[in-house]
Image: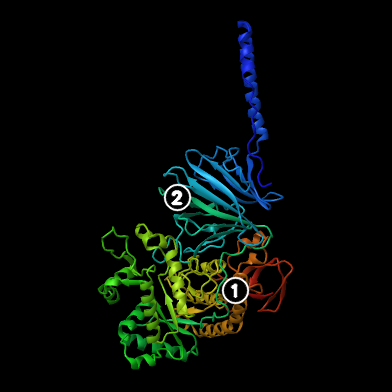
Amino acid sequence: DHTMPLSRHTGQIPESTWTLGFREMTEPWKGAVGCLGVAVFFAMTIGIISWQALEQSPEEWVLRGRAAGMLWERGRGALLLRALPAGRPVLAIAVGSVPATEPPPPRDRCWHDGGQFCYSWEEDAELRLSLEPPAAPGTECYGVRWSPLRPDVTLKDCFSMANVSWYGGPSIRAQRWPLNGAESPAQPLVSGDLSANPDGFGPVLERYFLGSTGVTVTVAPEVSLLLSLESHQQFCLETPAGRAEPLQYQLCVTTSGENPEPPAPKPYFMRDFPPCRSPIWRYHGPEGSAAKIKRGLRSLVRRLKRHRLQEGVVALGERGTAVLAAADLVPSERRKRQAPALVEPLELSITLSPYAAVTSPLFLRSLRGGEAAGYWLSRQPRPGASSIPLLTTWKGQLCARLNVTSEAALGWYLARARRLRQALGATYVAFEGVEGNSFLEQDVPAPTELQGDRYTEVLAAALATLGNGTVISAGSRSSHLPLFVQMSPLHSDWSHAGLKGLIPSVLHYSLLGYNFFIPDAVGGSVAGATPGDPELFVRWLQIVTFLPVMAFGTPPWLCCDTWVLNLTRQCIQRHQDFVVPLLLKYSEEWQSLGHPIFRPAWWLSPTDPVAFTIEDEFLIGDEVLVAPITEKGQTWRDIYLPGEGHLWLDTNSARVFDGGTTLRNYSASLAEVPVFVK
């Protein structure tokens, strides 16, 4: 029996006998009966009102499954999800689009089907709740669908943060873990470039939210919606105004008490995922001409050799790559065979983007070839009119953007990337500017195949065919692809937009399935309040040692003294000897089970509320806990050791501690980072 009976049968009183007897009465009697009737009516009304107040609870079941059920709460107009049998509250959703006082039951529109509940507010919207097939074993799922009944209704559901910590969703400039501390006005739930729009959503984004009560909220990719974050209150999903589109999402509650499955589809590449050569040294030298760049690269390699750091990758930015490309793409057979070794013995990484400046030879050449007009995103022309590229800005220049819906355009773009990689002898190709919806930014209706984050999804799938050495700047429904994701730039300071945001970002990327990311350069790459702060450099270096790739913008010999230079060498060695084998081990677990590689403290303590808000520690798999210092000037911190019943060994002091406890004021001098092995 899925649903409670919702309609009460009102017995009809046969009318004819009453009226007949009443006619035969004398006048005085009629008056007396009338008075009596009024009195009885008042008494009954008062009785019914008091009965309603006493009997009718403010909550009413509207749909019941086996492990949970949905209720309607009258007072504030909210949908509640409660776990059975005890009725433990899992989730409260405040409904913003319909009159709260009007209770949905007992008018049930789809009563013939026990797995559904429907109700319609005549003027505003219709609600349909349905039991859905489970998304993963050990879960029970409910579909929620609101349909507007007139065009100006904005549908808006708000998910309470009271007693629930939320994770997932979008990346933001000052990343928080959990999301509860974040603040954002309502804006389209679409990835974006944080350097262009710092208050927008960042480049890694999934329509998936995970609550600490064991509930997930998932929105289908074709639903267009806005997300707002109200710090420590709620987050809200709403439909765009005036579009009369339905709001729909799926709620799943775990019935097994385990951690909910992340949304990542299982990766299809097995074992062929080499850890990127580490470290990455970003080239910041002169870029005026090809000759200057080649001299600058040789000089950087000489310095790295002199400081005994001659390993890893030298990364050339987009501008440097373009200058070399213009000079080097002279097709001659002799050159093809031996690519220039620009950075021997290191490897080279080059940078491209799907943008072309309207003044660039590349763009002008593409317009001369008649069929190439379709190579760039364009507005939908009227029938018979010619299409004109949609213009957008990228790094301060007016640009056109690659049309990923055209097979010809993608083929041309990938062939060019392969040719460039070969001509320059590059091992890695990084693609910037993969995120964002150009139509949305220009307020132009997007074609159906490029709604939401489809651009990122389609381009990522195409770039994955270039092979293992591919890095992209964004992720949306692409976590199963063998690509590295470049994290957003962070500020060179101690704030959440800088160092404090690094671990929340690591946990966010990993939870959403993006385990192979390249963190921003040690010390941050956006000028902060304290440029060239050696303490910040060291604390940053200590975290990055335990991540998939170490990247440097400012080389250690420029920012700091020999002590830091020696520490950098030690950290690079520790990364190779200790961290890379761990990552390979847990990437197999990710590929087989879908578990993230970098895990929050609550992964081992899923019922301890203390663990839900820890944003300055992370686990690698289940066996290594890293608890770095993220406060300026501190040499001690509190460390939460997760997993009751486990023992943790401090790798610095060889002391052993119990899991499920907090170590108070634990010492960590500038030279050390607390790391525990289970």
Q: Is residue 370 visible to the viewer in this orientation of the structure?
A: yes
Say which residue label 2 marks: 245
**Measured from the top left, where is residue 134 in percent x and y?**
62, 58
- Position of 49 with respect to 440 (left or right) is right
Q: Amino acid at mark 1?
A: Gln
**Measured from the top left, where is residue 675 in percent x and y?**
63, 75
Q: What residue is shown at x 59% (from left), y 76% (from top)?
A: 587
**Measured from the top left, where is residue 558 in percent x and y?**
44, 82
In this orientation, which residue lies closer to the viewer: 302 or 531? 302
Cα–Cα gap, marks 1 and 2: 37 Å
Q: Secondary structure at mark 2?
A: loop
Residue 562 lies, with reference to residue 62, above or below; the image says below
Disc with the residue nearer the chain's start (1 vs 2): 2
- Position of 533 with respect to 607 (left or right) is left
Structural crowding at the residue carrying mark 1, measured as other residues with C-alpha within 10 Å and reported as few (<14), some (14–19) or many (≥20): some
Q: Amino acid at mark 2?
A: Glu
Q: Quadrant of the C terminus?
A: bottom right
**Measured from the top left, where is residue 225 in percent x and y?**
46, 54
Say which residue label 1 marks: 591
In this orientation, which residue lies closer to the viewer: 115 or 658? 115
Structural crowding at the residue carrying mark 2, measured as other residues with C-alpha within 10 Å and reported as few (<14), some (14–19) or many (≥20): many
Q: What residue is shown at x 49% (from left), y 80% (from top)?
A: 468
